[in-house]
Structures are given as structure tokens and as C-alpha cells.
Amino acid sequence: MDPKPVSASRTTITELMIPSYANFGGKIHGGILLSLMDKVAYACASKHSGAYCVTVSVDNVDFMQPVEVGELVSMKASVNYVGNSSMVVGIKVTAENVMKGFVKHTNTSYFALVAKDEENKLVKVPPLILENKEDVRRFVEARERRRIYFQSHKEMENAKKAFDMEEEIKKLEGERCQIRLKK
């Protein structure tokens, strides 16, 4: 399997934000943006892998600025990291007010996807050719995010196994909750 450069799978999706995408507050609904991010992540990962891809996790969905009706939203995606069958796709979201010529960065997210075959089995993806300093930085950062992700999931599993109700109730003192256990 020949390696592929990051540049070979870079993908951009741009869409005009229409009134039906707005939430009750008049801003573009976060779910609309997540759906567009998932689409661009799929397209990018599929271009790199040459296979059907599915999203397995999403990291860092922080909505830094609202998106308004009438703005042109662009989702720029690139494969930042590859494992055996997995890929991490970095996505930068910008919103452009075309009337005023103003562009704002609204979100940066990381989607982990895996490549699958027709029988829904994982398939190996091509290695990634890092072409510049930015590609190397993104690969290293994605690898570190994955390490932290797997470490935190392991810690949470261990915490579930070691859960002690009385001990945890003591730790909740001063929190904004009330415990009213039903017997």
C-alpha cells in the first residue's frame, strides 16, 4: 500500500447558512454544523483510505463564535494522523459574512474515523506522507490527543470498577447538587 500525502485528501465543503438551519436563538444550530463536519470528515478520510469510513469519535467541539443566517460556512479538512485502520481528520470551520467581507474562525474539531470493507471489517489505510512542518506538528498533536483519549477512557473504566458510594458522596460536598436516594 503506497503512502499518500496529506495534500491528496484535503477537502473543503462550503455551504450557505439558511433560515431553516437556525435554532430558537436565531443562530445556526450546532447540530447542522456537526452534520457538515461529519460530511467533510467522511469525504477527507475516504479520499485518503479509498474505502468506506465511519466516525468513531469526535474531539473538541467548542463553538467559539456563533454562525449567523446568511453566512457562508467553510469546513476545511485534512488527515492529521493515521493508525492501522483509523484516521484523525482535523477540521477548521470558518464563517464568512459575504456582504461585509468578514471571516471568523468558529470551530476546530478532530474526528476519528475507521476504514471498512464491504463486509464491515476494518481495512488497513495508507501511511501518511508529512510534507511540511505543519503536517508534522498536526500528526504529533493528534497522536498525543489519541494517547490522552485512550488513557482517560481506561481511567474512567477503572473508576467505575472502584466506585464507592459513601466515598463519592463525601466528595460532592460543596457541589451544586442534592442527594435524595430512594430506597
Image (tube, grey):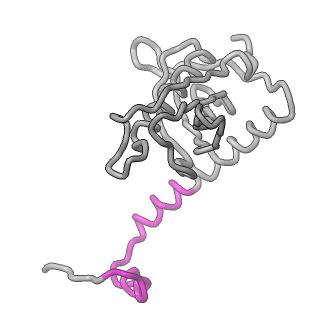
* Residue lying at 74% horizontally and 38% vertically, measured from the top left: 138
Residue 82 appears in view: yes
Side of 81 relative to 63 (left or right): right
Residue closer to the observer: 131 or 97: 97
Q: Is residue 69 magenta?
A: no
Of all residues shown, which one is farthest toward the left? 183
Name the residue nearer the viewer: 161 or 61.
61
Does any portion of residue 93 appear in the rendered image?
no
x, y (%) of residue 62?
54, 51
- Left or right side of 101 for 175: left
Q: Is residue 36 above or below residue 1?
A: below
Q: x, y (%) of residue 123?
A: 54, 19
Q: Quadrant of the C terminus?
A: bottom left
Q: How many marks can you see?
A: 0
Expressed as whole percent of the image width and height from the top left, the position of residue 104 reads 64, 43
Residue furthest to the right in view is 133
Main SS, magenta residues:
helix
Q: Give coordinates of residue 13: x percent, y percent.
A: 55, 23
Q: Which residues are magenta?
A: 152-177
148 vs 3: above or below: below
- Image quarter for residue 105? top right
Lateral position of residue 179 relative to residue 65, left or right: left
Q: Closest to the observer: 124 or 68? A: 68
Quarter of the image with the N terminus is: top right
Q: Residue at x 69, y 32 (%)?
A: 80
Which residue is situated farthest in the front direction here? 99
Within the magenta stretch, is there residue 172?
A: yes
Closest to the observer, 18 or 133 = 18
Instruction: Say which quarter of the image contains residue 21.
Output: top left
**Residue appearing at x 73%, y 16% in the figure:** 4
For residue 183, side relative to residue 18 (left or right)? left
Relative to 167, say whether 159 is above or below.
Answer: above
